[in-house]
Every structure is written in C-alpha cells, then in structure tokens.
Image: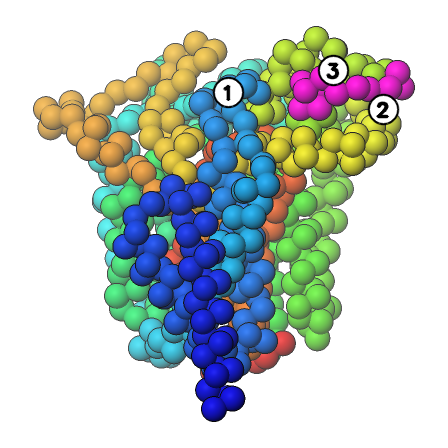
C-alpha cells in the first residue's frame, strides 16, 4: 500500500510539474493552442516516466547540457528585434529579462527527455545495407552523381552569367585587376593570383571582363559539384542505404543554395569544400589502425590549401591538428609529420618570405570584431569611462565614430575607422581596457555579442542573404560586371524567379543546432564515440566565427556544415564494426 501511494505521489508531482512548466513556457514563446499544450504535456510526462522507470538519467546527461544550450538559443532568439543589417541600437537589439531566463530553465527541462529518447530511437535504427568491398570497386556512382549535379546546376550557370560578384568578391576582383605585385594579404594572395589567371584567360578570348569572371565561376562550379558528389560517394562507401545515397545527390542537385555558391566569387565556397574533404578524410581515420602515406599526403595538401586560401585557415587547421593529435595519441608521430610540415611551410612563406617581398599581413582589427563591438555598445549606452580608458579607446577609434558608427549586427563600419597602427602597437592596452569594462558591463557585453553572432546560434530565422545576393551583381566599383540571362537568350524564356525560389535552405542557426545534436547523439553512444573526430573541422570553423564574427547573418562562414549535412545526419545511425570505444 505504501509503495503504491509513493508511486502515485511522484506521478502526480511529475505531472503537475510538467503541466506547470508547459503552461508557462509555450505561451511565452507564442503558442497559445490548448490542444498542443495538452498533447505536449502528455508526451513529456510519458517520456519522463519512462526515464524514471528505466533509471536512464545517468546515461542522458549529455542531452541535459544540449537541452539547456538549445533552450538558451531558442528563447533568446525570440527576444531579438532585428530591422536590417545596419540598424542602430534602437532598431537591432535583444531583451534579456528574468522571464526569459526562467523560460530557458523550464524549456530545457521539457526538451531534455524528448532529445534523450529521440537519440535512443536513432541508435536502434539500422540504415546500413552495403559492404565496403562491394562499393569501393564501383566509382561509377561518383561520376554519375557529379554529372547529375552539374546538369541540374546548368540553368543557374546560364541564367546568372557571369556569376555572383557581390561585396567582398567585387573588392577582391578590383585587387586582381590592379597591375603589379600584390602587396597586401587581406584579400589573400593565392586567391588574387588565381583570379588574375582566369581574368587573363578571359582576356585572350574577349575584352569583356565578364568572360574571365565566368570562366572562374564555371571552374569553381565544377570543383564544388565534384565535392558534393564525393560526399554522396563517401556515404555509399560507408554503407549508407541507397535512399540516403541518392537522396544526398538529389539534395545537392535541386537546391539552388548549393548551385548559387558554386557561382559566387567568394573564397568561402572552395574553402568550405576543403573543410568537408578534411572531414571525410578524418572519417576514414576512425577505422584505420595505422595512418598511411596516402592519408598523410591528403591531410597535408588539404591543410596547405586551407592555410593559403583564407586568412584564418591557419588557425582552423592548427586547432584541428591539435585535437586530432590528442584523439589519436598512439599515432601522433605519423600525424604530426604532415601537420608540422603544413605549419612550417605556412609560417615560413607567410612570415619571412612575405616580409622579404613587402607583402603586408592582414590587419589586427579583423580579429577584434567582438571586443570592438562590445566596447562600442558600452559607449553607446553612455556608460562612464576613466580618463586612461578614454585615452586608449579614443586613440583606437575617435569618440565620435565610437558613438555614430556602431551597429549591433555588423562590425565593418567600426573596423574601417580603426587606427590600425595604434592598435597594433597598443593591443595589450586595448585588451586591458576591454577586461576592465567586462564585469561592470557584463550584460551589455553579452547582448552585444549575441547581436553580432545571431546567424550562428539563433534557430529558425531566415534573416540574411539567401536569395539574389549569391548570384547577383554588385558592381560597387564600376568595373563593368553585367548580368546576362543566357538561358533566356537560348530558349526565349527566363526562369530566374523560379531558380531564385529554390535558393532557400535550412536557416544557418538551425543547421548549427542540427550539427550539435548529431554530435551529442554520437557522444551518447559509447561504441561510436571515435566518430566524434568527424565533427571537429566543422565545429572548429563554427567556433572561429563565434570568436571573431564580422556580421550577424552570413551563411558563407559556416557553409561547410550545410555541405556536410548528409554526413552529419547519418553519423548517429552509422554502425561500423571497426570502431573502438575511446
């Protein structure tokens, strides 16, 4: 009788708690439907009851952490007011109140059993149906997939001739058009040299500058589509079900999102492709007992490309290398050789060699976006500064610019007026002031940080550049770039609107949380934990953006997660007999 009464008591208490949390949480988030509230309460109650009976809380701690972090992102994302990218502090802002914080706690408690049980279901699903020996002998799948993707992307290539020349792409092209040696690495020397080659090649065909741009866009499209096809092929090699293999090919083929990135003259497309290739390479490492010479060569070449194709490539590769060396301690020497070679070559060329030829390094203010924005928010709110703090800060940026050029979701306007020479010489003083202002203005710092990084943590939001920004022309320097609809010229009909309607993809903030849920689900399965290394390149790229974010919404900085999405979704289901627990 006592046992029955005790059991009834905790069931009533649990039900009351779940109902109370649901009634508080869902209306706060904008859901007032009584039916949904009742159904959701019943589901959460049932899942909690099952976890109590099974005593599975100890195994589910990782999902408690994920639920809390996701709830922070979801609730705080709902508190954001955003007008446009250059909106000022009264137009772009976030409200962090006590009700929002309480909702974070209640929502995380409600989501915890949902995420935990979903992972249990995932672990029981089998999606493997092919053996490696069978598929390794059939590379025809790769070439067929590549051809399908290229054909499906062809309407974009023709309709948006010569490609996407926007923002930074237009600025980089201007440097590429300038005569003489490249004396600054801000736009990346290797990228400029490659663009110069295609502009020169186009010049041999026609005096029209658009021809050279088109040749580069087509080449990039071919390479990028090849990487997409290789992702599908890798899933095939790893034994994914045929539906997953062909579903991956179809996703790339029909999505204008990927087609548009093939045409965009940004470094990010091929850089992200290299990160994905590194991700797939590390997937092989999870099964091999020894690192082969072939692996070392591929690892080194990808590392060199990353380091020389983008300014933060060195930092990303170094972080990945350190984590890989820690994860595979028994093979540290074999992995260290190609990694050290990449670092040595990069540091020598980008150090003494660049100095010898007078090539300037990228300015320090590029990596100071977050501290600059946080301090600007403090000044914008009229907080008091000491005379010594004013001396440092107003030497880096004038007092007028600190107040007038700060926009919460874009750091470019402030970075352009930084006294770079002073900042380079007094970076320690600047960081000391930043630390001094941290604790007295902690809430302001948090809000400024969240507003600058919105697109990389805020789920369910389609703000940002998703449409013609990738395939349009922004000839901001009047260099003569002009869109031509070759598809319409050939067929007599324009399909631009239809193509643009297919560019929309999963929101950038949402795809981040999909990646982290997949990571958490793999972490919860002991026999699969060796596969966690596959997430490292993508996670490092995301972390670097979160540390030095220049703009709140721009998918290109985490494009690698979108490209690798089929792998991210498949990893929690993947069963590999060769995996060992770590």
| Residue 558 % position (x, y) | 50, 43
Q: Which circle's residue, 2 or 3, is located before the other in the chain?
A: 3
Q: Which circle's residue, 1 or 3, is located before the other in the chain?
A: 1
Q: In this view, does 230 lie above or below 207?
A: below
The residue positioned 46% from the left and 38% from the top of the image is 78
The alpha-carbon separation of the residues under discs 2 and 1 comes to: 35 Å
Q: Is residue 211 above or below residue 229?
A: above
| Residue 364 % position (x, y) | 73, 28
Q: Furthest residue to the left?
A: 492
Residue 459 in view of the camera: yes
Marks 2 & 1, CB-CB < 8 Å contact: no
| Residue 562 % position (x, y) | 42, 48
Mark closer to the observer (2, 3)? 3
Q: In which quarter of the image is residue 358?
A: top right
Residue 574 in view of the camera: no
Quick check: 185 left or right of 551?
A: right
Would you call the spot at circle 1 few (<14 residues within 10 Å), some (14-19), or many (20 or more)? some
Q: In this view, does 248 lie above or below 176?
A: below
Q: Which residue has dot 2 on it? A: 425
Q: Which residue has dot 3 on it? A: 397
Q: Which residue has dot 1 on it? A: 91
Quick check: 549 left or right of 207?
A: right
Q: Furthest residue to the bottom?
A: 1
């Amino acid at each position: 009788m006592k046992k029955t009464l005790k059991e009834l008591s905790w069931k009533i208490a649990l039900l009351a708690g779940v109902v109370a949390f649901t009634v508080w949480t869902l209306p706060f988030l904008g859901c007032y439907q009584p039916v949904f509230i009742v159904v959701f309460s019943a589901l959460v109650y049932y899942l909690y009851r099952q976890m109590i009976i099974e005593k599975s809380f100890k195994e589910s701690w990782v999902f408690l952490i994920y639920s809390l972090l996701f709830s922070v992102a979801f609730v705080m994302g709902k508190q954001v007011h955003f007008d446009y990218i250059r909106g000022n502090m009264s137009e772009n802002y976030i409200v962090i109140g006590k009700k929002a914080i309480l909702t974070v706690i209640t929502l995380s408690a409600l989501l915890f059993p949902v995420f935990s049980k979903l992972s249990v279901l995932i672990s029981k699903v089998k999606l493997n149906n092919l053996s490696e020996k069978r598929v390794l002998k059939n590379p025809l799948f790769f070439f067929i997939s590549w051809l399908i993707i290229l054909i499906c992307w062809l309407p974009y290539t023709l309709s948006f001739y010569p490609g996407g020349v926007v923002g930074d792409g237009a600025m980089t092209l201007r440097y590429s058009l300038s005569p003489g040696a490249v004396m600054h690495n801000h736009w990346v020397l290797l990228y400029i040299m490659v663009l110069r080659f295609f502009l020169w090649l186009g010049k041999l065909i026609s005096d029209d500058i658009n021809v050279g741009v088109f040749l580069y866009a087509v080449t990039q499209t071919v390479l990028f589509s090849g990487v997409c096809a290789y992702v599908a092929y890798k899933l095939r090699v790893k034994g994914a079900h045929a539906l997953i293999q062909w579903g991956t090919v179809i996703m790339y083929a029909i999505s204008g999102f990927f087609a548009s990135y093939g045409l965009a003259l940004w470094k990010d497309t091929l850089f992200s492709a290299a990160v994905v290739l590194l991700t797939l390479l590390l997937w092989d490492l999870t099964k091999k007992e020894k690192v082969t010479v072939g692996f070392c060569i591929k690892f080194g070449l990808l590392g060199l490309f990353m380091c020389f194709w983008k300014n933060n490539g060195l930092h990303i590769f170094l972080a990945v290398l350190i984590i890989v060396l820690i994860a595979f301690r028994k093979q540290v020497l074999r992995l260290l050789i190609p990694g050290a070679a990449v670092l040595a070559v990069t540091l020598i060329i980008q150090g003494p060699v660049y100095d010898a030829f007078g090539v300037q390094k990228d300015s320090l203010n590029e990596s100071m976006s977050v501290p600059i924005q946080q301090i600007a928010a403090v000044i914008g709110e009229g907080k008091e500064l000491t005379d010594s703090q004013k001396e440092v800060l107003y030497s880096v940026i004038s007092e007028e610019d600190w107040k007038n050029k700060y926009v919460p979701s874009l750091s470019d306007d402030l970075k352009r007026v930084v006294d770079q020479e002073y900042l380079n010489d007094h970076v320690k003083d600047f960081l000391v002031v930043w630390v001094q202002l941290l604790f007295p203005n902690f809430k302001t710092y948090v809000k400024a940080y969240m507003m600058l990084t919105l697109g990389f943590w805020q789920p369910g939001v389609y703000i940002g550049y998703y449409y013609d920004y990738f395939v349009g022309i922004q000839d901001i320097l009047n260099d003569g770039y002009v869109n031509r609809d070759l598809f319409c010229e050939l067929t007599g009909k324009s399909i631009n609107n239809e193509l643009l309607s297919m560019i929309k993809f999963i929101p950038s903030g949402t795809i981040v949380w999909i990646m982290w849920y997949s990571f958490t689900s793999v972490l919860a399965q002991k026999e699969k934990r060796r596969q966690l290394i596959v997430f490292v390149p993508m996670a490092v790229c995301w972390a670097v953006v979160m540390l030095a974010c220049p703009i709140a919404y721009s998918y290109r900085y985490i494009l690698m997660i979108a490209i690798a999405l089929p792998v991210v979704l498949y990893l929690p289901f993947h069963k590999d007999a060769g995996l060992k627990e770590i």
